[in-house]
Image: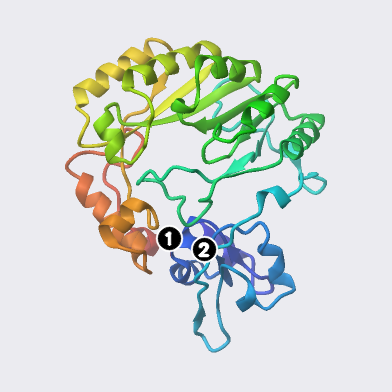
Amino acid sequence: MPTQWFAALGEDVTKVAIGPHSSATPAATLAKTGCDVALRGEPDQTLVRLASEPWEQITGCCFRRADGSLQISPDLGVADMKALGPLDFHNYNVEAHSHCHHVFTGEGRGAELEFARGCPWACNFCNKTLFRNKFRERNVDAVLMEVDRLVGRGVDYIYFIDEIFGVGKDVLKLLEALAERDVKIGFQTRIDLWTEETLDLLGRAGTISMEVGIESITDEGRDELNKNCRISTGRITELLIYARSKIPWVQANLILTDKDDKAEIRRWQEHLKSHGVWVSEPVPMFPFPGSPSYVEIFGMPDDQAWERAHHYYVNLFSHKGFSDIQEQKPLPIEELERSAA
């Protein structure tokens, strides 16, 4: 899709790719998409510099030189979140966005905001290492200004796109302020960040969608994933059930590990579902290039990183089975790209 979209833009524009693909494998991103620039890391404060500065001087900027050789930045762009002021949305069609992220019932007008970026944990399955890694909070007043501007334009639901909502020192201040506003919220988080008291606050703040990464139902499984979870499975269960008493949609996500018995997983799922908590089927872990898992298995990513990770993944789980939401006989990346071309 990005390749087709870039091609449709024509030749008289500068095409820039950002995200985990260009961060981990910039040369492959340039070659596959036909873009002019692949930015490594965060683009918030580097993207605008492309219009006025030599590209080789911009942190994270990767591009093809006039002689055909590649300029690959060894460094990642990292945004100063405190310096990013509130968006005013004057040139953004907020009214056209009717989707409510991770809400499956009812109607409403949704929007996405960011309170904090990055994550202080280093779970080995997570692909945030080369993109949105270091944890930083934004200024609460700046975020609230964005909330008020969106609500003033008819938005009644905000999904926080934070890697992990609920970590920072100012999140409770934000929630107290949201409780005074006529708006609903959703996010993804860790259940061990919350207590019954703070879950009560989430309810008062209008939370209607809470997605929680549990990953494994055993201490051994969570340790294998380097989850650094601070509470037991029993306590996790208590908090999920309590959260559901305050929040209409609570989802617990699982990853398939060798430490979990499938019969035990089924019993745990059924117990939580009987209390209204949705629990996913365990999803086999993909070694995303740049993640600790990928580096442990293969080393640092190169131009064949995505193909290598996909081959490994398919071969490993072809006999173990994939999750209920996945293609059961996935094709190799190379074949998918040939068919798209």
**Image spot of residue 202 (x, y percent):** 59, 20
Residue 331 is left or right of residue 154, and the answer is: left
Please name whichever residue, 223 or 14, is drawn nearer the observer in this view of the structure: 223
Check the image and report above or below for 74 versus 317. Answer: below
Is any atom of residue 332 visible in this view?
Answer: no
Indicate the position of residue 51 as horizontal and vertical percent values.
73, 71
Q: Disc 1 marks which residue?
A: 340
Badge 2: residue crowd in 10 Å (few <14, some 14–19, many ≥20): some
Q: Is residue 172 above or below residue 257?
A: above
- Amino acid type, label 2: Thr
Residue 3: mark in rendering: 2
Marks 1 and 2, Cα distance to the nearest angstrom? 9 Å
Task: Name the residue located 20 percent from the left edge and 36 percent from the top edge.
Answer: 258
Q: Are marks 1 and 2 in contact (CB under 8 Å)?
A: yes
Tag nearer the camera, 1 or 2: 2
Residue 42 against residue 180 in the figure, above or below = below
Relative horizontal placement of residue 265, taking residue 291 as reference (left or right)? left
Specify the amino acid type for callout 1: Ala
